[in-house]
Amino acid sequence: MANGSPVITDFRIGTVNVHSFRHPETSKSNAKELASILGPLNLDVLAVEEAMNDYDWKLLCNDLSLTHSVFGASHGVSYGNAIASRHPIVEHFKQKSKIDADGGYRAMLRCRFGGYHPFVQNRRFAVTHLDHLNEDDRLTQIKEFSPHNHDINVLFGDMNALTQNDYSDKYFGEIVAGKREKAGWEIPRFELTQLLTNTWSFQDAFRDVNPKLKDEQVATCPYGTRIDYIFLHPLSKDEWLLKECFIVDTYQATDHHAVVATFEHKSKSENNIENDT
């Protein structure tokens, strides 16, 4: 490397539903436990859903060395979505849904980062948590938030939505559709993820990197389904490539697993290929 050339490091992002920072079984704070799980991952950006804008959120940010944060309420003033980062937040916008769905009000938080890491330049991030009861309401909410029209490049979220090719026929019949039928929930539908990927051209980071994983291997919630996502809309002539995307077991500290994605610069990827040949 030439003298004075900056080291271009990988960039890692993650998302998790923190369950109001309460352990699902004990109802005690789960912030420290989540910090111990996520800490070794060295995240540059963390987006969370079902967050409380309180001491636990500040504790999690501090323990993960994410010194910049922004919160966007969906219910009242202290419950909603939040984003924390190692990089300054130079712009943010909180958008609440105007529809009164049976599952409650929802919101999207958008932001843009500053600083010197080249990954954040001209890239917009957003996080949302969509309705948990009804696909029609989810569709109305995501259309209202309109991430494609706001030039969102990285969309995090607990979408409460399914992707059809996540499941084998047997697993789908017994676990996905079967459990829902017994519980009297909505039948499985896939319009939300199809809208994002097929119509709005977002990439499903986890599915793109792990095309063969199915069934319990992809589950992010206790019901055996994948409902937590990182969607990508790369920049024109993007110099950053998706390197990996994986699910992180939260060991029941919350009722969702985390999803993490890592990006590397094209020059580093090309050097790796040359070294392998």
Image (cartoon, rainbow, N blue to C red):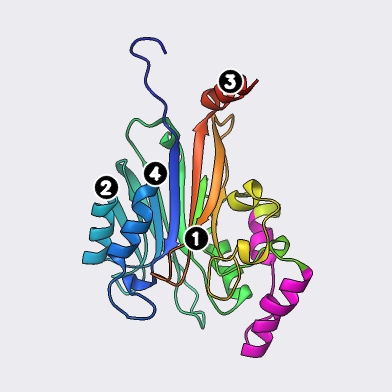
Mark 4 or mark 3: which is in front?
3
Label count reads: 4
Tell me whether circle 4 and circle 3 mark residues in contact (CB < 8 Å): no
Work out which quarter of the rendered image holds the C terminus and state it.
top right
Mark 2: secondary structure: loop
- Residue 180 falls inside the magenta stretch: yes
Q: Position of residue 104 (x, y in %)?
A: 46, 79
The reply to whether residue 201 is visible in this rendering is no
Residues at marks 4 and 2, CA–CA distance in whole angstroms: 19 Å
Magenta span contains residue 200: no
At label 4, which amino acid type do we have? Answer: Arg
Looking at the rendered structure, the kind of residue marked 3 is Asn
Which residue is under mark 2?
65
Identity of the residue drawn at 72% across and 73% down: 172
Considering the whole magenta stretch, tell me its main secondary structure: helix
- For image coordinates 61% across by 69% down, the residue present is 225
